[in-house]
């Protein structure tokens, strides 16, 4: 994975974190959003992008920790040493490495956005209660839809994690068979 790809990935994750963090600040200070917020100076956009990137790093780590714990508790047949196998694949085959990195990127974004949405929902409710931006019934409708999207993201992350393990296992078997035939990659 190139540095640019990782930067964009973390920026995408960080944008979600910036949304709920901005909403949290708006709830604390009682700020009601208007269309004037769309007129942002480019220098402010650079600062906000930088903050989103840093938030993306933090949220990625938090989401990874939470999902890893859930995967270890609930999953059966997980690889004993996935990091070691992944490193071996990354240095052994460029084609397999690209596939592994692409799958990992989707997993990282999906689990981080599940985490972002989970944090955004109570912050959204607090903000709405503070400023009364929408009727309570619509607020709860948004929360219900948010929980559905969060569950969808979490379920997708779970499936992508299982796919990642299968991909590692299959790639490792392929490389082992390739080496035992006396070929070099």
Image (tube, helix red, strand yellow):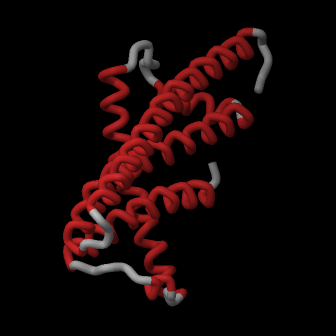
Residue 116 drawn above or below residue 82? below
Q: Which percent across, then down, holds residue 125?
A: 26, 60
List the single residue furthest toward the right.
183
Q: Residue at x 64, y 14 (%)?
A: 173
Quarter of the rendering occupied by the C terminus: top right
Asked if one can make out residue 61 in the rendered structure from this viewpoint, the answer is no
Q: Residue at x 40, y 44 (%)?
A: 150
Q: Relative to the observer, which residue lies in front, 97 or 35?
A: 35
User: Which quarter of the picture shows residue 180?
Assistant: top right
Kindly tell me whether residue 113 is visible in this rendering.
yes
Task: Tell me where residue 141 appears, x and y as whole percent.
Answer: 36, 52
- Rendered view: 122 above or below 90: below
User: What residue sits 74% from the left and 35% below the top?
Assistant: 95
Residue at screen point 50% across, 35% down: 156
Q: Left or right of 71: which side holds 184?
A: right
In the rendered image, residue 88, in percent from the top left (x then y), is placed at: 58, 29
Q: Position of residue 111 (x, y in %)?
A: 44, 42
Quadrant for residue 170, please give it: top right
Give the mark count: 0
Q: Nearer the viewer, residue 16 or 1?
A: 16
Does 44 sit left or right of 185 as displayed?
left
């Amino acid at each position: 994975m190139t540095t640019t790809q990782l930067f964009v990935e973390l920026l995408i994750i960080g944008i979600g974190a910036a949304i709920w963090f901005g909403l949290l600040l708006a709830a604390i200070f009682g700020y009601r959003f208007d269309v004037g917020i769309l007129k942002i100076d480019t220098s402010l956009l650079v600062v906000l992008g930088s903050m989103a990137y840093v938030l993306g790093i933090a949220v990625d780590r938090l989401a990874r920790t939470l999902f890893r714990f859930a995967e270890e508790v609930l999953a059966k047949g997980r690889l004993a040493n996935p990091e070691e196998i992944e490193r071996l694949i990354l240095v052994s085959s460029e084609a397999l490495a690209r596939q592994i990195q692409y799958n990992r990127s989707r997993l990282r974004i999906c689990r981080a956005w599940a985490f972002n949405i989970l944090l955004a929902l109570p912050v959204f409710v607090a903000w709405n209660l503070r400023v009364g931006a929408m009727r309570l019934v619509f607020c709860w409708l948004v929360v219900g839809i948010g929980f559905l999207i969060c569950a969808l993201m979490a379920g997708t992350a779970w499936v992508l994690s299982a796919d990642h393990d299968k991909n590692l296992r299959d790639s490792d078997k392929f490389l082992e068979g390739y080496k035992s035939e006396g070929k070099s990659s």
